[in-house]
Image (tube, grey):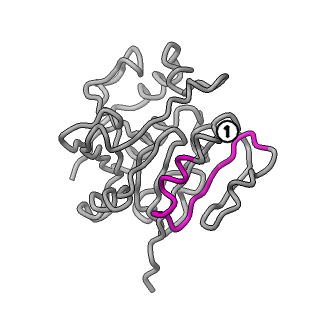
């Protein structure tokens, strides 16, 4: 018997970014059937998360990859969200419109890149095309490196196994490698620059984004992207 697809939002956060996370949760709460929060380096579940719809997990530190901890669950429209982004009230409707247009056979995102032919000398400088979620762009484009903080996919059609990640701070690359192995088209969806709102984590004392931490030393990132010849799959 056909089982109804569940709308789930999935996030990873750390104690120093928890107040940011609460704002992200509020922005999607009314659109979700379930919201899961992977709590890296928490000793206990904050009382603010004792709400209907919210499921929490405290486990080993998975960094940003924690948002994909549940991605092998069946029968879900699986949305990954980041704690520093505020999502619009039409987010689920907009993303599902694009997924359903392609019969749920794509990985949908608002952020993505097309790599130059590998090998590249630097991951952060090896782009042929960059489509940034905060800047917006006019045309939806098939890509090969996805942004996981603004993505959605049907878990019956796409399998992302976080236990196979070798580095949890390279979550976009790890996810993209698995999509490449499955020959899954990844679509960066056109949207305006005002569609998403952003709160800068670097303004919080002691907090740095993954980009800030690794942009000047991307040896591991570069080795990972140079491990295959990338393709842009399309429908």
Q: Nearer the viewer, residue 98 or 166?
A: 98
* Residue in the image at 48% along x and 18% along y: 215
Q: How many marks?
A: 1
Residue 127 lies, in percent from the top left, at 31, 23
Image quadrant assignment for residue 64: top right
* Residue in the image at 47% along x and 58% along y: 78
Residue 173 lies, in percent from the top left, at 46, 35
* Residue in the image at 30% along x and 32% along y: 135
Q: Which of 93 and 188 is in front in this view?
A: 93
Q: Does the magenta stretch include residue 32?
A: yes
Residue 144 lies, in percent from the top left, at 33, 38
Q: Name the residue under label 1.
A: 14
Q: Is residue 127 magenta?
A: no
Question: Is disc 1 surrounded by few (<14), some (14 to 19) or many (20+) residues within 10 Å?
Answer: some
- Outermost residue on the bottom side: it is 1
Q: What element carries label 1?
A: loop
Q: Name the side, left or right, on which 29 lies relative to 98.
A: right
Image quadrant assignment for residue 207: top right
Q: Which of 193 and 9 is in front in this view?
A: 193
Quarter occupied by the N terminus: bottom left
Residue 109 lies, in percent from the top left, at 36, 46
- The region drawn magenta spans 23-42
């Amino acid at each position: 018997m056909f089982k109804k697809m569940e709308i789930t939002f999935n996030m990873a956060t750390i104690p120093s970014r928890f107040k940011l996370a609460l704002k992200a949760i509020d922005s999607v709460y009314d659109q979700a059937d379930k919201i899961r929060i992977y709590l890296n380096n928490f000793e206990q579940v904050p009382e603010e998360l004792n709400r209907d719809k919210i499921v929490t997990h405290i486990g080993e530190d998975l960094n940003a990859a924690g948002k994909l901890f549940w991605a092998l669950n069946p029968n879900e429209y699986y949305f990954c969200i980041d704690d520093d982004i505020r999502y619009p009230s039409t987010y689920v409707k907009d993303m599902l419109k694009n997924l359903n247009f392609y019969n749920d056979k794509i990985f949908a995102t608002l952020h993505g890149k097309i790599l130059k032919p590998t090998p590249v000398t630097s991951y952060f400088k090896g782009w042929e095309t960059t489509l940034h979620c905060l800047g917006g762009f006019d045309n939806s484009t098939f890509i090969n490196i996805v942004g996981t903080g603004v993505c959605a996919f049907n878990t019956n059609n796409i399998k992302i196994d976080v236990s196979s990640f070798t580095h949890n701070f390279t979550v976009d690359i790890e996810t993209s490698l698995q999509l490449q192995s499955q020959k899954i088209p990844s679509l960066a969806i056109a949207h305006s620059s005002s569609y998403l709102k952003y709160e800068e984590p670097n303004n919080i004392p002691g907090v740095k984004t993954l980009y800030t931490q690794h942009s000047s030393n991307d040896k591991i990132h570069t080795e990972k992207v140079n491990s295959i010849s990338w393709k842009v799959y399309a429908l």
